[in-house]
Image (spheres, helix red, strand yellow):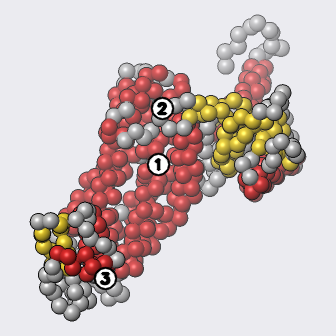
């Protein structure tokens, strides 16, 4: 009997020559003759029942009846239970990161195979996040769901989460750096790579890479926001949990706003990881500055004859990957035949009597004549190329104009006087490595010696600055400071010697 008065009673009965039968009638409840049951059911539910009717069809009817009669209290319980179940899965993922990946790599680092600082910088504060969720938030949620009948609320529990959101801010800020370090040490250290591959092959990893698992904490806070919003929609205005839930949502939503940009970045990173695997671990694909614009199959017209060959294109914001299909028993795989940089690229329509919908992509590395599957597909590709080229040109112009306005500082003056800082809004990319800035994972920093705007990677050095009383401060690169240090040491040696410096002599300062 469904828990709703708007539905009639429901009777189940078995018959020797039929599958399980259900009969419902708005006027009365009775058992019809076997030959009448199918027509009755067809009248009410649009399902014709025969001797071969499957149980799955009957279950659909049950689902229809019960979901349409769900009370508001049941909906609130379902949301709270979803929070609990997703929290369990999340804690399992955190345990994998903290107690398996992190622990195994730290254990290996103690053998001096690689430094412990590398491992700590990759995993950031994952242990603190894991401890909070496994020892505090999850047990509280489990206890509350066990006593839901007497205490139907979750707002007060989620309020305990809000002081710990700073941990997520730290993790998100470090994420880009962690991805770079992970790639760098996977390429550099065979023992490091072997440990990661061995863990990734385990069933607990679900055939996902370490990078995929490390995305979870970035995505978790917006998940809380989404569930709380749904919960508040179903929560009556006078409910005891209303105030706590609204207060929790306000703080969590603020934190989620800061995470959303990072999430968009991580979604792009997920796609990059997929491409990386499809291309057989092609170099420099998993880079936060790479943004996939368009991908798809296309035909390549041969230069020497009239044949057309199946190819696959990946268009990024900074390059085009021209790929050929590769035989694979597991999913689609491709091999990169050519990389063509966006800088200096041109695209134009071409006309071929034998092959319609053709266009040409010309770059410094190679020129390709391509055939799209339709007129619309051709227009879509040309538009994507033109927009990508235009954006690249705009960034380069901004970059050049910023350099044009920089007051040149001679090497010998670096650190001796304060430079003119380039304004943040004058550049869109790092003035050292040219990687694009973003608000979360690649923020702007100023070199305290020359005033250039650079990314964290290019400002991860320190030197003493004379104009700041010989205090240590951030400078843009080792290369530039190598020159400065050479000049400074020569000056220091000259000032401490009694006569001119002699080539080949050693001076101890």
Gap between marks 3 and 1, in whole Å?
51 Å
Q: Mark 3 vs mark 1: which is more N-terminal? A: 3
The residue at 34%/85% (across/down) is 236
**Residue 328 visible to an observer of this rendering:** yes
Residue located at (52% from left, 31% from top):
328
In percent of width and height, residue 357 lies at 80, 49
For the residues labelled 2 and 1, say whether their Cβ atoms are less than 8 Å apart: no
Which is nearer the N-term, disc 2 or disc 3? Answer: 3
| Residue under numbered circle 3 | 43
Residue 381 falls left or right of residue 440? right
Placement of 50 over or under 110, stated as above or below? below
Left or right? Give the position of 409 relative to 315. right
Q: Which residue is mark 1?
A: 215
Query: Which one is in front in this view, the residue at disc 2 or the one at disc 3?
Result: 3
The secondary element bearing badge 2 is classed as loop
Q: Nearer the viewer, mark 3 or mark 1?
A: 3
Above-or-below relation of 232 to 405: below
Determine which residue is flagged by label 2. Answer: 329
């Amino acid at each position: 009997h469904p828990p709703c008065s708007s539905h009639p009673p429901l009777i189940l009965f078995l018959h020797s020559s039929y599958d399980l039968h259900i009969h419902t009638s708005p006027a009365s409840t009775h058992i019809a003759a076997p030959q009448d049951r199918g027509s009755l059911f067809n009248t009410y539910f649009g399902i014709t029942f025969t001797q071969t009717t499957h149980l799955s069809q009957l279950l659909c009817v049950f689902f229809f009846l019960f979901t349409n009669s769900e009370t508001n209290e049941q909906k609130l319980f379902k949301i709270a239970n979803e929070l609990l179940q997703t929290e369990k899965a999340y804690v399992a993922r955190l345990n994998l990161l903290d107690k398996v990946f992190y622990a195994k790599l730290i254990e290996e680092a103690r053998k001096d195979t690689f430094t412990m600082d590398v491992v700590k910088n990759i995993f950031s504060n994952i242990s603190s996040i894991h401890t909070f969720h496994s020892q505090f938030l999850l047990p509280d949620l489990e206890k509350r769901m066990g006593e839901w009948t007497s205490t139907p609320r979750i707002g007060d529990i989620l309020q305990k989460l809000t002081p710990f959101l700073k941990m997520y801010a730290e993790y998100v800020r470090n994420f880009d750096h962690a991805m770079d370090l992970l790639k760098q040490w996977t390429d550099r250290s065979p023992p490091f790579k072997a440990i990661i591959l061995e863990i990734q092959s385990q069933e607990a990893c679900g055939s996902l890479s370490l990078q995929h698992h490390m995305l979870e904490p970035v995505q978790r806070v917006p998940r809380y926001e989404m569930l709380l919003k749904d919960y508040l929609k179903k929560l009556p205005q006078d409910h005891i949990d209303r105030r706590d839930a609204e207060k929790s949502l306000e703080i969590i939503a603020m934190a989620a706003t800061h995470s959303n940009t990072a999430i968009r970045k991580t979604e792009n990173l997920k796609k990059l990881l997929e491409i990386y695997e499809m291309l057989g671990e092609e170099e420099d694909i998993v880079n936060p500055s790479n943004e996939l614009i368009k991908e798809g199959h296309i035909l390549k017209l041969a230069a020497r004859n009239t044949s057309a060959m199946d190819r696959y294109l990946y268009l990024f914001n900074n390059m085009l990957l021209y790929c050929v299909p590769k035989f694979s028993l597991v999913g689609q795989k491709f091999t990169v035949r050519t990389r063509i940089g966006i800088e200096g690229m041109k695209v134009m329509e071409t006309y071929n009597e034998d092959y319609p919908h053709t266009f040409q992509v010309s770059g410094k590395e190679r020129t390709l004549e391509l055939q799209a599957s339709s007129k619309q597909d051709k227009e879509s590709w040309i538009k994507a190329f033109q927009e990508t080229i235009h954006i690249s040109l705009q960034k380069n112009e901004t970059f050049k104009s910023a350099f044009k306005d920089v007051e040149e500082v001679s090497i010998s003056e670096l650190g001796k006087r304060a430079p003119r800082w380039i304004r943040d809004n004058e550049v869109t990319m790092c003035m050292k490595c040219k990687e694009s800035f973003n608000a979360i994972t690649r923020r702007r920093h100023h070199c305290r010696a020359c005033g250039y705007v650079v990314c964290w990677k290019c400002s991860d050095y320190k030197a003493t600055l004379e104009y700041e009383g010989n205090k240590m401060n951030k400078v843009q690169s080792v290369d530039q400071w190598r020159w400065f240090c050479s000049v400074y040491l020569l000056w220091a040696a000259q000032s401490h010697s009694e006569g001119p410096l002699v080539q080949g002599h050693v001076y101890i300062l």
